[in-house]
Image: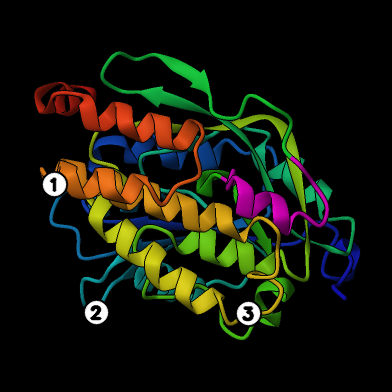
Amino acid sequence: MAESLGSVTPEPLVSIIMNCFNGEKYLKTAIESVLNQTYQNWELIFWDNQSVDNSADIFKEYNEPRFKYFYAHKHTWLGEARKYAIEKSKGDFIAFLDVDDYWFPSKLKKQIFLFSNMDVGIVCGNYFLKNERNQKTHLALKKNLPTGWILDQLLQVYFVGLLTLMVRRSALDSLEYGWDPKYHVMGDLDLVIRLSVNWKLHAVQEPIAVCRKHGANELVKHRSRHVNELEIWIKEMSHVNEIPSSPNFHCIINNYTYQKAIDQVLQLHKVEAFRMSLDLPLGLMRMRLWLVILTPMFLIKKLKI
């Protein structure tokens, strides 16, 4: 179904997609983490989404032939920007690193090894979450990541961190379409779940990267958009036989209801949020939502729920 590693080159080319919009604050750390990789056959596709800070100057300081700079013809949402960046890539495998995250040196080497199984189209790994406000770090995923044919597990709990995601090019090409440009904050979930219908997922169980949490992450800034995108995705995937027929498709629907209710709380529509909570099964998710509804707004804002 897919080419072996050795059929491309002894060390196949990995295209690293780095989308940037005003990312100067953490950019050097992200770039250095690519340069420090023990696996060296890579190219870095840097898609500048019309930044107005020093991001371009920082990137161009490096005299590195594997660095490839592209300036967007217009500013776009992330999904469209990622699609354009992928189109510029040439690697047999594609990895993703945002400018505010960084990798550990053995990240690529550990992951490329797992693609030796020709049925594997996706490889991910565990990672650390770093709170930039208090500098505390904790492991993102407490249990071992499931591997193999795991569509059902992904629908139950989506655990793939974009900063650890690597995709086989032939797997991406096997889809009707690749990265969907209409999704700004959940394009990776869409892609990984569609891939998992026909491709296995493998995982590096130990942490291989660090994801910064700093209050300006796209998912935090665009919570309402995330809810809207999730609604669109559920409607679209309802027509893909393998996905709605999964026994865990209802988990995605419940998550959508929960996220939409939280968004209603943040918009001061607590009565509507409570009404929506009744659509959730009686359990931890509904109890957690009730707790948020009962929490004073000043505390919700302080806790950044």
The mark closer to the camera, 3 or 2, is: 3
Residue, disc 1: 269
Q: Is residue 212 above or below residue 243?
A: above
Is disc 1 in contact with disc 3, using a CB cutoff of under 8 Å? no
Residue 289 lies, with reference to residue 200, above or below; the image says above
Residue 282 magenta: no
State the separation of the CA atoms marked 2 and 1. 40 Å
Badge 1: residue crowd in 10 Å (few <14, some 14–19, many ≥20): some
Residue indicated by mark 3: 240
Residue at screen point 82% across, 55% down: 115
Disc 1/disc 3 C-alpha distance (Å) = 34 Å
Q: Earlier in the sequence, mark 3 or mark 2?
A: 2
Task: Name the residue type under label 1.
Answer: His
**Dot 2 crowding, Cα within 10 Å, few <14, some 14–19, many 20+:** few
| Mark 1 or 3: the one toward you | 1
Say if 198 sits above or below 44 in the image.
below
Real-space CA distance between mark 3 and mark 2, rounded to the nearest whole angstrom:
34 Å
- What kind of element bears circle 1? loop
Task: From the viewer's side, name the closer residue of 280 and 57.
Answer: 280
**Residue 130 image-quadrant placement:** top left
Can you tell which quarter of the image residue 166 is in?
A: bottom right
Residue 85 screen position, x and y as percent:
44, 70
Which residue sits at x=23%, y=23%? 303
Disc 2 target residue: 73
Amino acid, disc 3:
Val
Q: Main secondary structure of the magenta part?
A: loop
Q: Is residue 238 left or right of residue 285?
A: right
Name the spot of residue 304 as percent of width and height, x first.
Answer: 23, 29
Q: Which residues are magenta?
A: 146-160
What's under tag 2, amino acid-wise? His
Q: Quadrant of the rendered structure where residue 155 is?
A: bottom right
Disc 3 is placed on an element classified as: loop
